[in-house]
Every structure is written in C-alpha cells, then in structure tokens.
Image: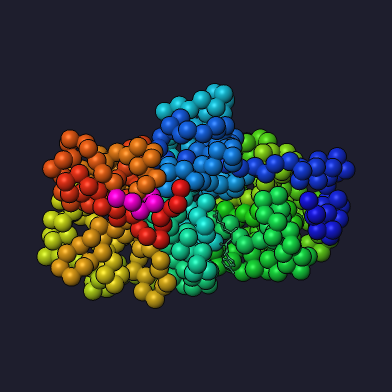
Amino acid sequence: MNLPEEFTRRMKLLLEPEDFKAFIESYSDDKSYGLRINPLKIESQETLPFFLSPVPWAKEGFYAVPEEKPGRHALHEAGAYYIQEPSAMAVAALLAEPKALNVRQTFLNNDNKNTPDDNATIFTEGTPPKVCDLCAAPGGKSTQIAGMLGNKGLLVSNEIFPQRAKILSQNIERLGVPNAVVCNETPENMAKFFPCFFDKIVVDAPCSGEGMFRKDETAIKEWTPENVTLCAERQKSILAEAEKMLKPGGVLVYSTCTFAPAEDEEILLWFLRTYPDFHVEDYHDILSLDISDGNPDFISDEMKPLSDNEIQSIHGSLRLWPHKVRGEGHFAVRLKKQDGEPPIQKKKKKSSGKNILSKSERKQFIDFISEFVSETNDYEDKRYEYFGDELYMVPEQMPELKGIKLVRAGLHIATKKKNRFEPAHAFAKYLKPDDVKQYYECSLEEAEKYLHGDVLQTSDERLSTSKGFILVCYNGLSLGWGKITNGTIKNHYPKGLRINY
Ligand SMILES: C[S@@+](CC[C@H](N)C(=O)[O-])C[C@H]1O[C@@H](n2cnc3c(N)ncnc32)[C@H](O)[C@@H]1O
C-alpha cells in the first residue's frame, strides 16, 4: 500500500519506534469488517447465519467475514443489522450512561455471554432524550443510537449533502426506526432551529480519513496536509454550532476516523479552551481497556503549555489504533456540558395546524389501517402531519420545523391518493408480523424473489381467501408490503430498492 509520504513522516515522529513499525505493518493486514445487530428487529446475533465474534466496545457489534457477504443477504434488507466498521461502533457507545455501560462491563466479565440484563438500553430511565447526529450519513451512528433509544425519545439525524441525506434516510427506514427526523441542513441552520434543544449530540466530523486508508484507496489519493488543516477548521465551525444546540448538562461526543492530532487532540484542546463549561468524561474503563488514550504529547508547540487539567482531559479521549485493536482506527471523546438553567427561548408552536389530520381524516385513516393492523389503539393518540400527500407519524418531541429541509419527519406511514390511503414502505418496515392481521413468511428463495420485485405465489391454506395488504416477512422480519388475492401476492417493494440476486 502506497501511503502518503508526509503522512508516514508525521506518524514516525509521533509514535514510538516499535509502535510506528506495528502501525505501518498493520496496513498489510486485512481490513476489519463488522456488523451491528439492530435491537429494534432482533434480540441476538444467534439467529444470523454468519460467523460472528463480539466487538469488545459495542454491545451489539460483531466482527464478520466479508466473504460471507452479509450486506447482500435478505436479512440485511430486512433490517436485522447494519454493516459497520468495528472501531466506528465506539462512538455511539460513548453516549450511553454509566449505569447501562456497567451492564456491558458485566457482559465482558462473563466471557462475552449475553445475559437478559444486557438488553438494558441507555435511555430507558426518566424522560426519553432528544439526540442529534449532526453529520449523520450514511447512518452508522444514527442507526446505533436509534437502537439504543428503543423507539423512545427523538433522534434528529442531519446530513449536509442531499444525495447522502437520502441514503441516510433509506438506512433509517430499512432498520424500521419510527422516531427519527432526517434533515438536510448546514450545521449553522440546525443551530438556528434547535437552540439549546438536545440532551445529546454526536459530531462524527468530516475528516481527512486516515483511518480509511486500508478500506478505501481514494482516501489515500485525496489525502494532503492542506486538507488536514482545512478539515480542522471545518471541525471547529461544526463544533461551535453543535455547542449552541446542546442543553446545559448535555453530552457531546466528538469523533473522527483520522489519526491527525490537528483534527483530534488539538480540536479537543481548542474546544475545552473555547468552552470552559465542558469537561471530558473518561470512558476507557467502561468501554474497553484495549482502547488507547489520546496523547497530550501530540499537541503542537503553538498550543503549549498544557495545564494538568488539560493533560488529564486529553488522556480521557479515546484512540483506537489499527495495530492495537481490531478496527480501522478512530478518535472519540465524550464531553459533558455544565448543568445550569437554559437561556429562555421563544417557545416553538407544536404545529401550525394546517398539515395536521382533521378529526374526520383521522377517523378515515384509523379505519384504513384497521383493515390490516391488528390493534389500532396504539395509533389513535399519535401526532400525524402531512408533508404534501405524505402522511407522517411525527415524534411527540419534535417542534414545528417550518423552513428546515426535511427528508423524513418521523415514521412515514401512508400516502394520500385521492380519497384513500396507501400504506408507506417505512410503515411496513416498522411493523412486526404480530402487529398485522395477515403476513406471509417467505423462504429465503421467495424473499430474494420479492426483493427483486417478483410476484409471489402461495399455496398456504390460511391465506387462500385472504385479500388486501399483507406484510411480506422473512425470518419473522418484515420486508415490505404485498397485496394478496387468490394466493397471489402482488409486489409492493419500492422499485428503487429492488435487488438482483
Ligand atoms: C464521517 S462522515 C459521517 C459518518 C456517519 N456519522 C456514519 O456513522 O455513518 C461525515 C459526514 O459529514 C458530512 N459533512 C461534510 N461537510 C460537512 C459540513 N461542512 N458540515 C456538516 N457535515 C458535513 C459528510 O457529507 C459526511 O456524511
């Protein structure tokens, strides 16, 4: 592998000779590859037909074998898991509260045996939090956070580039997440819409991507020292906006997938000096002791001298090195904002009302879903809003977002067509077989046909007289809608998502 010369020179200066040797040698190893199970869909990895071994720092994370192609399997489309580079899984894990993370520690101490307690999620106590993932596409951290939220609270996932925001939104849909709002905004606009709003924010910043070298040749080609400087400036401006959006007492997680101190330790130091009401919370002993500390010696002379407090804070950040852990490399730190009274904000109205379902429309909608949903009670007191003809079940904690570029406003539940509704694909992805009046459980071969867009033929006696919308499932997980008559299931899998197996 042809690493950029200046990159190698810098790493040689930073690392001890033995470390440097091991670091460079790690580039001849295979890249790390993993998947994270989606707790909204499956309880354990045991139902997956792949060879998996646990990632120490992420409860739902597993190393996988790329040759088994889990990304091409029907279970992937069913939202059972998300393919994610293992070291990246440490970032969202840093959002967890220590109590829940101690559960994880027990998990590790028990030879990685899964225990029922281990399903404890981080946000189950007290009011469910409002979380923002500010640089979110394609959705690795967002889908991990959604799993931790367990359909409670609010997740606002933002991505600045429209095409990437669309992919983010699709991944959120695939994993069946109901409480995520996807925005396509600049961090500056996000801060205007959400001042002092969030309990937790992740800034997984755009960076020079030195941790991508083994995975992606273009990261090597695009690397320049000037880009490192440019990224560092951009990271500061993104963090400055994130800070405005965080409530007092809130948690900010900053991360990059690069090794450049200018984007890691130095950004952390800059942040602590600019915002003295933040301090670092050290999670090494909670996440995994294999993870290294951030290094105060990496700080350049212009930023020296460092106080004892600053040195300790930098030690509290995490570095995942590819020669020390099984992962491509990451930097991450958890910052806590001092408690205090939030500045008084103009209260945002919940909604202007014009998009909201009228009483008669609400009745019409509930009547419509009662044709295929077993229990409509859960849907009766929810907040519904139209965006054009698209009807969304909007998370309760979402303020009115007039003027913001929205890609997804919660759970896309239906499309209005003249005087009737058509259930949305996202709604199918959210539902489980037990939630509906009729579902069809496919074989793997049928699932692949369905995902390809084919009509399915069933000889299942129970369905011989069935009519109307039916949830097409594989391994007990919904793939999408079909419409059944006389045992023939017409395919409603969205055209843009169809796959050639
Ligand atoms: C490291 S990636 C995020 C990866 C994502 N968190 C995940 O886990 O899948 C950084 C993201 O920031 C976006 N980005 C680029 N420039 C940005 C800017 N000026 N402000 C905010 N986000 C930006 C990129 O498009 C990219 O999707």
Q: Is residue 107 above or below residue 221?
A: above
Q: Nearer the viewer, residue 257 or 94?
A: 257
Give the main secondary structure, helix, strand or loop, of the magenta stretch.
loop
**Magenta residues (range):** 451-455
Q: Quadrant of ligand 1?
A: bottom right
Q: Quadrant of residue 53?
A: top right
The spot of residue 446 in percent (x, y) is 35, 42
112 sits left or right of 273 in the view: left
- Residue 329 visible in image: yes
Q: Residue at x 73, y 38 (%)?
A: 324
- Residue 435 visible in image: no
304 sits left or right of 445 in the view: right
Q: Residue at x 54, y 23 (%)?
A: 110
The spot of residue 215 in percent (x, y) is 67, 50
The spot of residue 470 in percent (x, y) is 23, 47
Q: Residue at x 45, y 26 (%)?
A: 115
The spot of residue 48 in percent (x, y) is 46, 34
Q: Please say whether residue 48 is one of the residues in the magenta stretch.
A: no
Q: Quadrant of residue 41?
A: top left
Q: Is residue 426 above or below residue 19?
A: below
Q: Nearer the viewer, residue 467 or 57?
A: 467
Q: Residue at x 38, y 63 (%)?
A: 408
389 sits left or right of 84 in the view: left
